[in-house]
Image: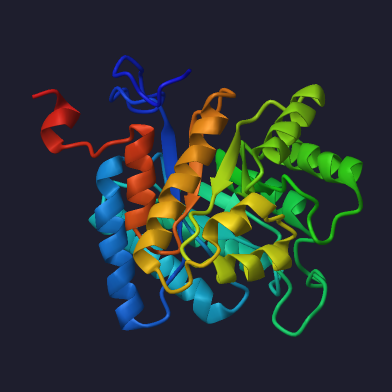
Amino acid sequence: MMTPYDGAGENTSRGEGRAFNVSFEFFPPKTPAMADSLWQTIDRLAPLAPNFISVTYGAGGGTRERTHAVVERILAETKLEPAAHLTCVGATRDEVDAVAARYWRSGVRHIVALRGDPPDGEAAFAPHPHGYDGSVALIAGLRRIGYSEVSAGAYPEPHPDSRGADADLDQLKRKVDAGATRLITQFFFDNDLFLRLRDRLADAGIAVPLVPGILPVTNFAQVVKFSALCGATIPPWMSWRFEGLDDEPATRRLVAAVTAAEQCLSLAREGIDSFHFYTLNRAELTYAICHMLGVRAVSPAGADGN
């Protein structure tokens, strides 16, 4: 049986002797209190030396500015690599290009390119008449601007707008052909779904890294709502595992940490060595899961070999 970490591995990105590469996703805060919480979370997770940290991006102008403010502060105050999310909802091509150029001038070199969800009150995505018509065109535009690292989204289960499995696979191929260098999945709880997607990509000759998106479950009822919106399946065993814990937050956190760590270790036994965590701007669960994976804090002394 594979052990999570035996001390003999090599970090593929930094050479610090750990088994897995991790990245973390955050969302921009809406209030000063939420901002304080976000920066406490970043401070807590930063010593784990993630490959990158991503910051989400909404369709509204205010959200865009908050995203940019978080990214600029990450660049100014930390040694972390930010990956700024960018969508093409409700904006012209020139406006999107201007945002990408602004990120570039700030020092950002990694974009997570997504089509984006329809604005509130709209049932389906409709491209701006003078905008990018979807993620494939956006990715190509980012590569023209000069970005050499562009991550894109992938769905282990059918996207709510899916036209079928073959169409989904073709869309992923178009993203990679346009210049995507990494695919990060929507969260999922059945590892077989991810592994089938990995195998289909390999069979289609799509060779960029496929990174599983991991969502630690802090609030099961909320995850049920999230899953209904994005088409993610919640297995019966998971409902049973969290049953009766609504008023038991401490126990629920323990169950959540073990569940997510089990998911990651099961994927590791299938050769997966990178994980992208949807932190929901909370640190402790993600930190605990990383600890169980063998991803430990890197001290300044350890980093330079003293």
Between 24 and 242, the one lying in front of the other is: 242
82 vs 76, left or right, is right
Q: Is residue 286 above or below residue 293?
A: below
Q: Is residue 165 visible?
A: yes
Q: Residue furthest top?
A: 8
- The percent coordinates of residue 18 (x first, y second) are 33, 26
Between 277 and 13, the one lying in front of the other is: 277
Between 41 and 183, the one lying in front of the other is: 41
Between 302 and 182, the one lying in front of the other is: 302
Q: Quadrant of the C terminus?
A: top left
Q: Is residue 239 above or below residue 122?
A: above
305 vs 57, left or right, is left
- The percent coordinates of residue 160 (x first, y second) are 80, 61
- The percent coordinates of residue 164 (x first, y second) are 91, 48
Q: Is residue 302 above or below residue 168?
A: above
- The percent coordinates of residue 174 (x first, y second) are 80, 40
